[in-house]
Amino acid sequence: MSTELSRFDHVRAVRFDDPVLLLLDQRRLPAEQVDLRCTNVAEVAQAITDLVVRGAPAIGITAAYGAAMAAQQRSGSGADFFSAWDADLSMLAAARPTAVNLAWAIDRVRRACAGLSVEDVVRVARQTADDIAREDLAANYAMAEMGAKLIAPSSGVLTHCNTGSLATGGLGTALGVVRAGVAAGSIDRVFAAETRPWLQGARLTLWELMQDGIAVDLVADGGGAWLMSQGKVQWVIVGADRVCANGDVANKIGTLAHACAARQFGAKFMVVAPWSTVDMDTASGDLIEIEQRDAAELLAYGESRAAPANASAYNPVFDVTPAELVDVLVTERGLIHAPDAAKIALLAG
Amino acid sequence: MSTELSRFDHVRAVRFDDPVLLLLDQRRLPAEQVDLRCTNVAEVAQAITDLVVRGAPAIGITAAYGAAMAAQQRSGSGADFFSAWDADLSMLAAARPTAVNLAWAIDRVRRACAGLSVEDVVRVARQTADDIAREDLAANYAMAEMGAKLIAPSSGVLTHCNTGSLATGGLGTALGVVRAGVAAGSIDRVFAAETRPWLQGARLTLWELMQDGIAVDLVADGGGAWLMSQGKVQWVIVGADRVCANGDVANKIGTLAHACAARQFGAKFMVVAPWSTVDMDTASGDLIEIEQRDAAELLAYGESRAAPANASAYNPVFDVTPAELVDVLVTERGLIHAPDAAKIALLAG
């Protein structure tokens, strides 16, 4: 783990303080820094649904600790343990529909515990949650170093949503590469798109980078294309909620627009995602269920209502960028230029 | 003027109620419908700067009435009339940097009044302002009919910012085409991008269309590309703050991103602008001064602050879409497919 890089990595979104799961409440950032204390699995699932914690890897880590917590709490329930715990896992898995890491983390805990005694399930579930968190952090450091090597000196970068320490086990995926590029001196200027409707860029990415003294300019989501046309951005660097077996990428709404502009103006488009985000069971992006959220999120801005009363909105919160618009996919297993099904299958092994 | 179409055209942004200029205060829509009463030219210029009125054609009409009002008020100042009025016109012209209609309207009043007596200046300035308003409305009806004829049945459209009655002398430019397409039954679904940072789409376009019973869905600015990739939008229809002699189009930030996505996914991109917006003296988009506004506009909305204290933002409020991404330019003089310098010069005559 690079010492230089760890100087840019102070925030942790998810902390298990046995028997309580502490989630830095991202709905309240940047105004307030408050932990939500989850003491049972229903609270953990609700926190995921309510966006207290967001970002695919952080959701996975949270769910794994929720599963471990549930095992501990169910361990006195005798013969009902396995059915009760199974229902807990199903509830966690249903908390958000799009992030593959959620299902992946639950499955990993379930597999690790298969055939074990109740006592061993409690121990192994906790150990698996710790492993998921630790491996995610290590993957981010590896991806950051790999991705940053691609960035030429004096580059400007644009990132979308929040893919940093708040969204992961630490450092971040796309934001990890941004941090590593800043640490290496190759990135001169960082732009963060505000990321409507939930404003993860304005609220979270700015806050995170400012904690570490990294200069960043907020831009309107629609402004990315203009930055690229003016030569101010050489790399668009984003995370992923799901990478399909063919390299199609589901990510926060607005990602696809940046990808189209990058192709038009010759900027490069980098997707940074841990291997847990790669879903080999989903052949292509058209098979992904895109989460639609409440119109109200779009009709207002924080406490300020923008749209007229009774207005309608269409609020898909993810989009799918086709693999042909992705210049490079960075995972902890290695990076793939111009990703496609064959190259991803090779890395899948 | 189409009776059918005029059923969709109730709002007026600028009304001269001699000697007062009434501006529907667009900063307060949609929550409140309040007129700002301007009683002198300084108030008119300030209203333009402060975005009480916005939209290139509406700004031009407002400035023309401001010039007429100034002539009336200066008419008792004797020998100083011409220098004082000239200073008034310069103040008006400086109220916003990007909109070509502002300079165009002032110049038209100035030319119409050149060499006249003070008494005649007062009369002709007022007459010219009335002409500008009336001609703009007529141009919008003509453009609406022309543009709508291009739209095949069962089309979805996406528009950006507000280009409707609030932005013009009435009906609107791009929104006039949308209204005509709805009236003709060819447009099935209308999406309005919210248009950060000032949210003209969410606040104004929704309000306008809802006044006329036209169904519209708000979408995030970054969501346009996703709509196009999903086949939900066949036409992106936007206005312009300035069209260059080569067909490059300056318009609200975010327009260029939609244009890139339209090209990527095969949607068509239509620019609707009165001839007064065409600036034959600006050869291409790289010569346009792009207005940068206060970072605070992007860091918050209304009472809701999103970004951390002391955060930075880069807030260019226009972008330039190169002519090669424009499928059709609609003006009241006719429409141009794949506009370029030669075709525009022909229409300029």
Image (cartoon, coloured by chain):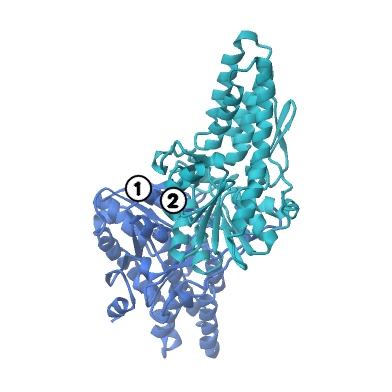
Chain colours: A cyan, B blue
Same subunit, labels 1 and 2: the answer reads no
Q: Mark 2 points at which residue?
A: A323
Residue A142 disc label: none
| Callout 2: chain | A
> Closer to the camera: disc 1 or disc 2?
2
Residue A109 horizontal/vertical position (percent): 60, 27
Can you say whether A130 is above or below B90 in the image?
Answer: above
**Residue drawn at 65 percent across, 20 percent down:** A121
**Residue drawn at 65 percent across, 22 percent down:** A70
| Callout 1: chain | B
| Circle 2 residues within 10 Å: few <14, some 14–19, many ≥20 | many
Can you say whether A237 is above or below B59 in the image?
Answer: above
- Measure how far apart labels 1 and 2 are at the Cα level: 21 Å
The residue closer to the viewer here, A322 or B172, is A322
Q: Left or right? Give the position of A320 relative to A272.
A: left
Q: Is mark 2 on a helix, strand or loop?
A: helix
Q: In which quarter of the image is residue A92?
A: top right
Q: Left or right? Give the position of A152 relative to B209.
A: right
Q: Can residue B163 be seen in this view?
A: no
The residue closer to the viewer here, A132 or B60, is A132
Residue B309 horizontal/vertical position (percent): 71, 54
| Circle 1 residues within 10 Å: few <14, some 14–19, many ≥20 | some
Q: Left or right? Give the position of B322 relative to A7.
A: left
Can you say whether A45 is above or below B233 in the image?
Answer: above
Q: How many marks?
A: 2
Q: What element carries label 1?
A: loop
Residue B211 horizontal/vertical position (percent): 39, 49
Q: Name the residue under label 1.
A: B232
Kindly identify the amino acid type of the residue bearing the numbered disc 2: Ala
Kindly identify the amino acid type of the residue bearing the numbered disc 1: Lys
**Residue drawn at 46 percent across, 43 percent down:** A345
